[in-house]
Amino acid sequence: METVIANATMARTNSNCSSQCNGQGVERRLCRRLLALWSIAALGCGFFAGTALVAQQPKPNEYQVKATYLYNFGRFVKWPETDPAGKGDSFSVCVLGQDPFGPVLDSTLAGEALDGKPVVPRRLSKPQGAGECRILFISTTEEKHLKEILTAVDEGGVLTVSDMPGFTRRGGMIQFVLEGDRVRFEINLASAENARLVMSSELLKVATNVKRNGRSGD
């Protein structure tokens, strides 16, 4: 990841590895990892170790990038050992409310594993059951119920993510933001720490803004 960040000044490219990430093993995971960082680092989807960029393809759409971010958040966040959701046989990535991802989320997570468990997408229409999720994406359709939802998963070891305006200000942990046509994110570290989640320094470095103890800072 540090290699990707170090190359953040590279000229933007229209390369897109979404159609190239259908292989297996390390190459597939690495390609998806780079795709998740595409909107930050202005990189194409070349592999590390000097391998060539893939042929130019249309760039990924907003929710392709966001879906891959959700997977990668799971790589750079550590959950408490007492996390109730961690006792299950799968690593659940949930969408609460109207689903903006559609099949993109399923195809992104297919065949992946986190914490030694298969990653499984779930759709929820109500907050009940959200405590069983490791990562919970809260749709903008649930904005009126946000306080209730966050209270329901408070201190439950659930990483909350959304793209609704003011999400981190209202207690959410990670908020997607658009800078031009690039997908980026900001972090409410205090909320994550209250839930006993540990975010890696690499994740904090690439956030556009990190709120610590109620204060914001780059």
Image (tube, rainbow, N blue to C red):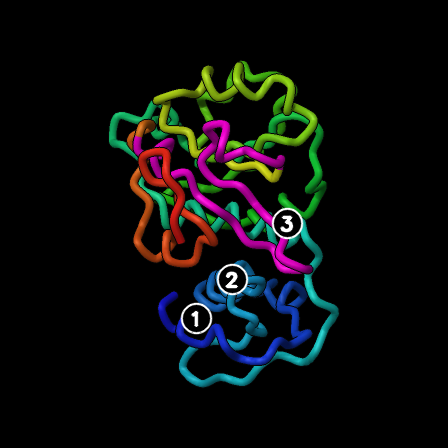
Q: Are marks 1 and 2 in contact (CB under 8 Å)?
A: yes
Which quarter of the picture shows residue 49? bottom left
Amino acid type, label 1 = Val
Work out which quarter of the rendered image holds the C terminus and state it.
bottom left
From the viewer's perspective, tell me whether residue 197 is left or right of residue 60: left
Q: Please tell me which of labels 3 and 2 falls first in the chain.
A: 2
What x and y, as percent, mark residue 11?
58, 80
Q: Is residue 155 above or below residue 191?
A: above
Q: Which residue is mark 2?
A: 37
Q: Earlier in the sequence, mark 3 or mark 1?
A: 1
Q: Residue at x 49, y 35 (%)?
A: 168
Magenta span covers which residues?
Answer: 164-193
Q: Is residue 218 visible?
A: yes
Q: Residue furthest right?
A: 58
Tell me if mark 1 has few (under 14), some (14-19) or many (20+) residues whose alpha carbon lies within 10 angstroms of its own. Answer: some
Secondary element under disc 1, as helix, strand or loop, is helix
Q: Position of residue 185 (x, y in %)?
A: 52, 49
Check residue 107 in the rendering and tell me which mark sits there, or answer none: 3
Residue at 49%, 33% in the rendered image: 169
Sequence-first tag of 1 and 2: 1
Three-letter amino acid code at the position of disc 2: Leu
The residue lying at 61 percent from left, 23 percent from top is: 124
